[in-house]
Image: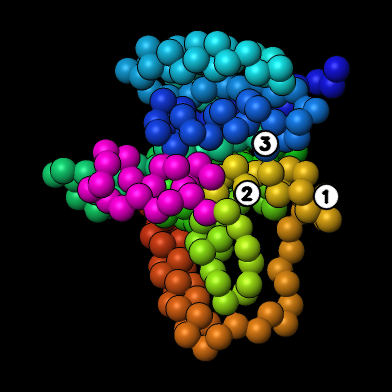
Amino acid sequence: MAEPVKVAVTRAAGPTAYSLLYSIANGEVCGNQQPVALALLDSSSMLGVLSGVAMELQDCAFQLLQGVTVTDRDEVGFVGADIAVLLDAVPAAQDGAEPSDLWKANVRRFRAHGRALDTYAKKSVKVLVAGNSANTNCLVAMISAPSIPAENFTCLTRRDRDRDRDQAFLYWEAPVIRAGARTFPNSASVARATCDHLCAWWSGTKQAGRWHIIPGLVLPPLLRQNMALCARELLRERDRALASLVNSHL
């Protein structure tokens, strides 16, 4: 049997991870012949929940699942990781929290993740960042892991892409669960998009998992305008994140 692919998932006690972990364990991400080992990371207060998730995964008796590690430490969870899924962005809406505080918290968190990945993960590790300000959080993690190729860091935009009808892509799409309809809005669709992103990146592209910019893509004027607005906002976020790194001496 082949060596297992080690997949580390942060905020593994959360609803998005709960949906995603079963897709990883049953072969949807790395293939139905590839063994996997899971490292579940979350805060120390969630270790009991993580242990329960680990027992559920083991009770499912997935043939491909070769082990489950539960931890609250990056230096344990990221050791030898082939894939890292970072789901633990600080939520944008927290009672009483100032936007600047949330921003700094995310910078600190993904700075720490990047440094740990740089030290403990494989240099070929593929890192996927999801959550609020995913592009900027991904940038912070990437620049904090200089020994890992920059192309090995991506952020989740697959859910938005799957909804794009102008380019005539046809994908199964999970129902969109509106905020307020349940305690954890959108977790199923985020998990589905994460699974599809990882599957394509790991083994489903003709470029053997490598990405490139497609030249000459014809875009409708409104879409091009919206993309330009997004680009400007991303550049502002980038500058703010870099300033936070400098000012906090992280």
Percent coordinates x, y for residue 161 in the rendering: 56, 63
Residue at image x 40%, y 33%? Answer: 15
What's the residue type where badge 1 is placed?
Ala
In primary-sequence order, the first of circles 3 and 1 is 3
**Which dot, 3 or 2, sits closer to the camera?**
3
Of residues 41 and 193, which is closer to you in this image?
193
Circle 1 Cα neighbour tier, 10 Å, few/some/many (<14 / 14–19 / ≥20) = few
Seen in the image, is 207 located left or right of residue 247? right
Of residues 205 and 128, which is closer to you in this image?
205
Q: Is the magenta stretch mostly helix, strand or loop?
A: loop
Q: Name the residue under label 2.
A: 197
Percent coordinates x, y for residue 18 in the rendering: 46, 29
In primary-sequence order, the first of circles 3 and 2 is 3
Magenta-highlighted residues: 173-192
Percent coordinates x, y for residue 135 in the rendering: 50, 56
Secondary structure, mark 3, is loop
Secondary structure, mark 2, is helix
Q: Is there any visible trace of residue 75 in the rendered image?
A: no
Q: Residue 208 carries which label?
A: 1
Percent coordinates x, y for residue 59 in the rendering: 55, 11
Seen in the image, is 152 located left or right of residue 195? right
**Which dot, 3 or 1, sits closer to the camera?**
3
Seen in the image, is 208 located left or right of residue 160? right
Q: Mark 3 points at which residue?
A: 28
Of residues 8 and 203, which is closer to you in this image?
203
Seen in the image, is 162 located left or right of residue 89? right
Circle 2 Cα neighbour tier, 10 Å, few/some/many (<14 / 14–19 / ≥20) = many
Above or below, 61 relative to 39: above
3D distance between C-alphas at marks 3 and 1: 17 Å
Residue at image x 84%, y 21%? Answer: 2
